[in-house]
Image: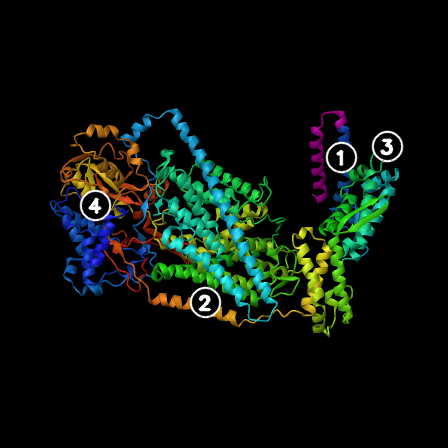
Amino acid sequence: MDRASDYFNEISESEPLLIPSSRRSSTSSRVWSQSPYIGGNLEALEQAGNLGRRPSEFNNPQYNSFPRHDSFDSIHLANGDAEHGINRSMQSRRETRDYTIPNALESGDSTLRNRYAPLRETSSTRVLSDRFESLDYDPCENSLFLKEESQQTFAHVNRMQTEKWIVMFLIGACVALIANGVVVTVDKISEWKYGRLRDVFDACSGTASDCLVQPLGLWVLGNIIPTLIGSILVVYVAPAAGGSGMAQVKCFLNGVKIPEFVRFKTLLVKIIGMICSLTGGLAVGKEGPMIHIGAIVGAGISQGQSTTCRTDLHILEDFRSDTEKRDFVSAGVAAGIAAAFGAPVGGVLLSLEEGASFWNQSLTWKVFFCSLTSVFVYNMIIGIYQGQPGDLSNSGLINLGAMADMTYLLYEIPIFLLMAVGGGLTGAIFNFLNFQLTMFRHKHITRNWARIMEVVLISAVTACVGFLLIYYVGDCQMMRDTSPQRTVQMLCSDGEYSSIATMLFQTSEKSLRDLLHDEPGTYKPLTLGTFVVAYFLLACWTCGSWIPSGQFIPGLLIGATWGRLCGIGVMLMLPGVAIDPGRYALIGAAAQLGGIVRMTISLTVILIEATGSIAFGLPIMITLIVAQWVGNWFNAGLFDVHIKLLRVPLLEWEPPPLSSHLVARSVMSHPVYTFKTTESVGTIVDILHKVTHNGFAVVSDGDIRSPLSDTPDTFGRMRGLILRSQLITLLQLKVFNESPDIDVIRAGLSIRSFRDTYPRYPSIKDVAITDQERRYTMDLAPYMNPSPYVVYMNTPFPRLFKLFRALGLRHLVVVDNRNQVVGILTRKDLAKFRVEMHKGKIKVEELAISNELAVNPITRACP
Amino acid sequence: MSFPTWNLILISFTFLFATAQVTTASNSAALARDLSADWQVLSSIITCSNGADVSCVEQLPRFWDIKNGGRVKREFPDGELDVPESISKRAARQSDCQDTLTAYGTAAAAFIGCSVDNSRPILLCEKCVESYLIAQAAFVAYAKTKDENNKSCDDIVYGSDLIEVVHRANRSIESLWGDSHCAYCFDSYYIRYGTVVYSFAQSLIVFDQKHQNLTGCFTDHGVVINTGVAEDMGNITNSSLVCKECYPYYKDLSDFFLKTYTEDITKTCMDVVDVMNQTRRMWGRYFQCEDRHPSMFLPWTVAIIIFASTVVFYIGMLFNSTFEYYVIRRQDRLVTSPFVGINESTSSSSNMSYPPL
């Protein structure tokens, strides 16, 4: 009991939570101590020792079969006694349902245990966390805002536009410089590491002694040391830097605030961790992390300040809002992709695909500029690094190399389709395995040392598997090249090199490029077959561990390997036909990655750009579409799986199908906390302490409800919406009507006062209010948003959804036809209706929302 | 109405329409000529569309025929058609061009023949440098020669055919020479006053010497090396002896190669690379001089320890994990639930079967 209540107290006072489901009513006589707020019941449940769960059959209601009597219940009950309207109706409603918590529970009724059948969840993805807040994408046009705007001149507006372009340039350049730094560092370290390894191996392999343990030991050590550094940094310094960050980027662009996601600290750990994981030889890529890095750079540069470093340059202050930041994050993401793949258009499209709702032409144009800048700067620097200053043609961290002569014939399309189906299936298997593994990790690998240990074990096993592959797969090829990277002799005779060792003794990007471009006879089928199985399992295992790791390159590499295998198969079946296995490798790569991440438009363009094969666009596209369809038949894409595991309230592109009969009145939070336009300070402080909600409707006094009315209880006439952060700022500045120097305070108040605390708003606990001040009042009208979006009670769900998705709303107040506040809607109220399409069945399920008690570091998502 | 009649009507419509477009007399004259030519062809088609008349096929103009075992041969009546080939030939004959062309053809053929002869083992650079230089000189001579109208042969020949035979031939020679990196085999090679002058690179001479030493050692031990093709070596009876005796020479050669040539493959004479590759193959695969099967006992031990510790780690984690609490939040609703009461207050700790997400 103690633990649970402690947890509860902690959460209710710490980071504000998203859902404003509150039950204070201004007309109610309920007092706080009697509030049926969850805390009280929770304690009782803990005491009774049976934290019951709902019956499992209620978990996945089919839309066409759900009982509709609930609404009749409440309407009927709402017709009760006028005087005790709220109390009575709520009370009786609770009592009528056998799975609610009746008062009997508090007396420890043991029979209840049977009635609360344990929730048999196959997965805990059917829960949304209330740890995640929405971002404020909707500007608040209060009087201060209007005042500031009225003072703006043409020069100011013009300067802001110019600054945007400059910031876009800086973001692109910065991301490119980081990409350059990473690629050069990784190149140098890997070259050194594998060079030593090769020497030791070659020195030993000529003898018959037992010296092979030396290269193996070196390899294991060479893998363990960097990954150890990387995972320690991630686990102890910046947990948000783990994984690839792709899922988190998607959430951020969707409008969900991910804690610590765009911190400077996270950026540093991400860069170092990425270098570590790559030099550690793990089966990971650097494209996902580059996207995350781009997002952080975008969010950072545009602010002109760093809270981590406690520096404020006092520039770009106009951009200190979620709305502006979002645009720059989109640009950063595009720049990251552009630098990683040398695909500026693909980057723009990825930003568009993942954050599609908040776009317009002007932003697209700026983002395109940013990503092209990124490619330009990257090429320039890499040209200098390779000793050809001025050469701007070497683009992309993974330079897949232009695929020359990409001709294909009609009869090859069916083969490509088959490969796409294969990619979809293997992608689904990958996602399934990774999902199970991630569940296991969340459940069992929860201690910090265990998380680090896991990464270390992965890297050690990766080395061992590589070693055994080299020893037992004797694929010796005639020396074609004398460059050291291409002549890993290993156990082959003089004058030959081991093709499997060559694949393993270089970065994954180079292996991928070789698979796309090497001569038809370079790899034996056995080599490719064993490699693809081993790499598939290793990549799946690595994905989601506590180290920065991208999933693009492993996906492409796996696909390219079995694609090449298919190409060899086709060659054998159709002798005499000129088949380039590299072409099949490209299709395989597209199919595999498409099957894993299920991205379509951006991935098509990225692959076209990275290989420079416009003519091959259609086959790539068809492959990706088919792979996506086949994969979606079984499960969701990797990022979506991880978003579900993170329990982020993500809003999809479209409202769930078949949801039009849901209306605002049935999904809104009710009752709600409201403030009057002139509210006492004590009440405000108490409520802010009591609940964790971030938005409050501001009302004038409500009218008396007719006893015969069948409308629900209301909470006053709607006047506006005020945010928690605004209230806290007002409290801190002591804008109280009774303050002696209220006029001075008011005169000094500007929109800047509210902006200064962005992005880390102070907590209500930081506000010191004296007892005397508690009796003061505060005028909220000038500071609230006087024109928030409101909807009627019977607004259908899809319309609500579109409002939220398209406008990036955070709160949506529900009013009745007399403009009386009856409820409030937030992102989670909509996100919890999630459509699941699985093996040809469609169902919409309503998710539960969890209280995050322990403030855990954010769970990892690998993509 | 029969089919030909329809055709006739159709064609006359076309005629009428086309004629209507014509406004000037000259145009109509030209048009009439064209049309009459068209008519000849069309009429044959029209007559033939009467039925499956075998003779019709014969009437169609036929320039291409397949004869002589599938080879395409051009066949047309003399004087009926002017083909570009005969024009250029005539043009070339009028000048000295044909002579230079012939000279170049001979030289090019000599080089190609030489390169094919020396393709296994590749000794292209060493053996064919002479014919290469001669071919180059012949090409330059051809390009420089001018006819009586002070027009260069190159212009005449180059401009008058579609496939640029001479240039294509020259390009293939150049690329063969270039891809073999032959320039790196020599310190210098040039042709002056009809004399070919070249000197091998010092490294090549040393390499050849070392290679001869090794080959000498092989022959001393009764190994017959025929044409350098390792696959044709036949049975090796005394390979262990060869391995032992010739190892110093092999090591010498191999070390020299690694020391001198591994800088950049694009700057290594192909002759050297190929000889080295063949020698290494012979040494490793056919004499089996190196036992490249080191013991795997210790590596397996290490690998098994690592694999086992991984398994132990996961099993340990399975039984020894910390539970994190999370509680399903109660959501307050006007309508209890749009579906069923799943959002009414339930709460849970994550015991055993509930993943603590």
The amino acid pointed to by label 2 is Ile
Disc on the earlier residue, 2 or 3 = 3
Q: Label 2 to label 4, Cα distance in Å?
A: 52 Å
User: Residue B125: image x %, image y %?
Assistant: 77, 53
Q: Nearer the viewer, mark 4 or mark 1?
A: 4
Is B16 in the magenta? Answer: yes
* Residue with the mark numbered 2: B306
Q: Residues within 10 Å of mark 2 (few under 14, many from 20)?
A: some
User: Residue B173: image x %, image y %?
Assistant: 76, 48
Q: Nearer the viewer, mark 1 or mark 2?
A: 2
**Residue B35: mark in rendering:** 1
Q: Is residue B324 left or right of residue B143?
A: left
Q: Secondary structure at mark 4?
A: helix
Between A708 and A672, the one nearer to me in the picture:
A672
- The residue sitting at the left extreme is A83
Q: Label 4 to label 3, Cα distance in Å?
A: 104 Å
In which quadrant of the rendered image does the C terminus of chain B lie?
A: bottom left
User: Residue A219: image x %, image y %?
Assistant: 51, 62
**Residue A519: mark in rendering:** none
Q: Is residue A235 left or right of residue A24?
A: right
